Image: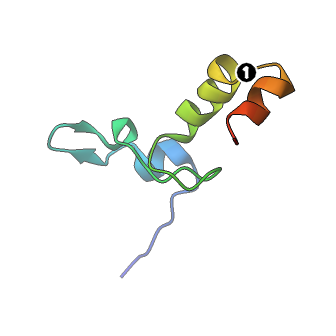
Amino acid sequence: MVISSVTNATGKWGNLDSQRGNLSELDLWCMICGDFHMTADHWKFMAEDMPKDPVDMIEDLT
């Protein structure tokens, strides 16, 4: 028996498809905050939707 390993991400995940599309399109556990969404979506929210003024961020806590 020969066991081979795949060293690149494309080879590792490229052939995994769900019945409704690629697994990369599914919401996954975010490595940053622990919620269920794509990590890329988290970074997009941080870059575009988060308030830039710290005072606006504090208002979310009250």
- Report the amino acid beneath label 1: Pro
Residue 41, relative to residue 3: is it above or below?
above
Q: Quadrant of the N terminus?
A: bottom left
| In the image: residue 44, left or right of residue 38 | right
Residue 21, horizontal then vertical, whole percent = 23, 35
Residue 22, horizontal then vertical, whole percent = 30, 37
Q: Nearer the viewer, residue 23 or 49?
A: 49
Q: How is the image coloured?
A: rainbow
Q: Nearer the viewer, residue 18 or 61?
A: 61
- In the structure shown, which secondary structural element does the residue marked by tag 1 occupy? loop
Q: Nearer the viewer, residue 9 or 26?
A: 26
Residue that lies at the very extreme toward the right in this rendered image: 54
- For image coordinates 51% across by 58% down, the residue present is 6
Residue 62, horizontal then vertical, whole percent = 69, 41
Residue 7 found in image quarter: bottom right
- For image coordinates 47% across by 68% down, the residue present is 4
Residue 44, horizontal then vertical, whole percent = 61, 25
| In the image: residue 25, left or right of residue 5 | left
Q: Answer few, some or many: residues within 10 Å of disc 1's Cα (few below 14, many 20 plus, some between 14 and 19).
A: few
Q: On the image, numbered disc 1 is attached to which residue?
A: 51
- For image coordinates 85% across by 27% down, the residue present is 54
Q: Nearer the viewer, residue 32 or 5?
A: 32
